[in-house]
Image (spheres, helix red, strand yellow):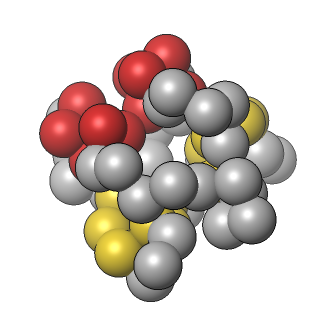
Amino acid sequence: MARIINPDLCVSCGSCADVCPVGAISAGDAAYVINADECIDCGACEGTCPNEAISEA
């Protein structure tokens, strides 16, 4: 199961994208987004989010 980013909580700091081992996270229009097809659900991104914007889908 992939993770998702809540755009209402994301402050576009990029910390999640910096730690993603497979490059599944990129900047979107209003917040970062996770490509569910590439996400390996390792949880690295969730542990770095300062606003707890990332959760399991």
Position in image of residue 5 (x %, y %): 48, 61
* View extreme (right): residue: 29
When asked about the image quadrant of residue 39, the answer is bottom right
- Location of residue 9 with respect to 25 vertically, above or below: below
Q: Residue at x 67, y 31 (%)?
A: 23
Answer yes or no: is residue 49 visible: no
Residue sitting nearer the eye, 3 or 6: 3
Residue sitting nearer the eye, 53 or 47: 47
Answer yes or no: is residue 38 visible: yes
- Location of residue 3 with respect to 9 vertically, above or below: below
Residue sitting nearer the eye, 4 or 9: 4
Residue 54 appears left or right of 30 = left
Residue 48 appears left or right of 32 = left
Residue 15 appears left or right of 49 = right
Position in image of residue 20 (x %, y %): 49, 30
Q: Residue at x 45, y 66 (%)?
A: 3
Q: How many marks?
A: 0
Position in image of residue 57 (x %, y %): 44, 82
Q: Residue at x 49, y 17 (%)?
A: 18
When asked about the image quadrant of residue 34, the answer is bottom right
Position in image of residue 25 (x %, y %): 64, 40
